Amino acid sequence: MIVTTTNAIEGRPVRQYLGIVTGEVIVGANLFRDLFASITDIVGGRSGKYENVLARARKEALAEMEEESHKLGGNGVIGVDLDYEVIGQNGSMLMVSASGTAVQV
């Protein structure tokens, strides 16, 4: 499946627009990960644990979106937008959402 942030796929004309598809993933922040991330914030550097969680959530949201497109008969998703939000009490969870337009090319 071709997934792109652009509104067209070069060399592959859209034969049919199938509608908007989405994928959402919400991940909770782990207490130990938070502790180590706060230490990283103090001493500087990157928080590998958070980066791994963020990457996993992004991949899962995109996979959900692709699956929804596939169920509609699509073989591509164009105009993909990724959004990240901190939600929950005290910002304890992260939501990653992906949306786009399912198409047949």
Image (spheres, rainbow, N blue to C red):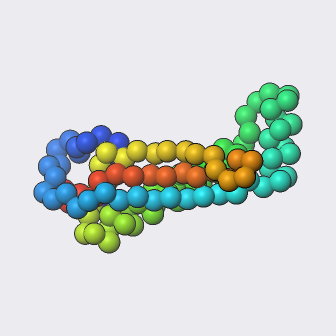
State the image quarter where residue 70 is shown: bottom left
Residue 26: percent from left, percent from top: 60, 58
97 left or right of 41 in image = left
In this view, the residue farthest toward the front is 89
- Which residue does the image show at 49% across and 45% down from the upper left? 83
Residue 73: percent from left, percent from top: 25, 69
68 left or right of 62 in image = left
Q: Is residue 18 above or below residue 50?
A: below
- Which residue does the image show at 39% across and 67% down from the upper left? 67
91 left or right of 12 in image = right
- Which residue does the image show at 80% across and 41% down from the upper left? 37
User: Quick one: quadrant of the N terminus?
Assistant: bottom left
Q: Is residue 78 above or below residue 73?
A: above
- Which residue does the image show at 70% across and 47% down from the upper left? 91
Count numbered badges in the picture. Answer: 0
Residue 88: percent from left, percent from top: 68, 53
Q: Is residue 35 above or below residue 65?
A: above
Q: Is residue 75 above or below residue 10?
A: below
User: Quick one: quadrant of the C terminus?
Assistant: bottom left
| In-front residue for pair 100/45 | 100
35 left or right of 71 in image = right
In this view, the residue farthest toward the bottom is 71
Residue 40: percent from left, percent from top: 82, 35
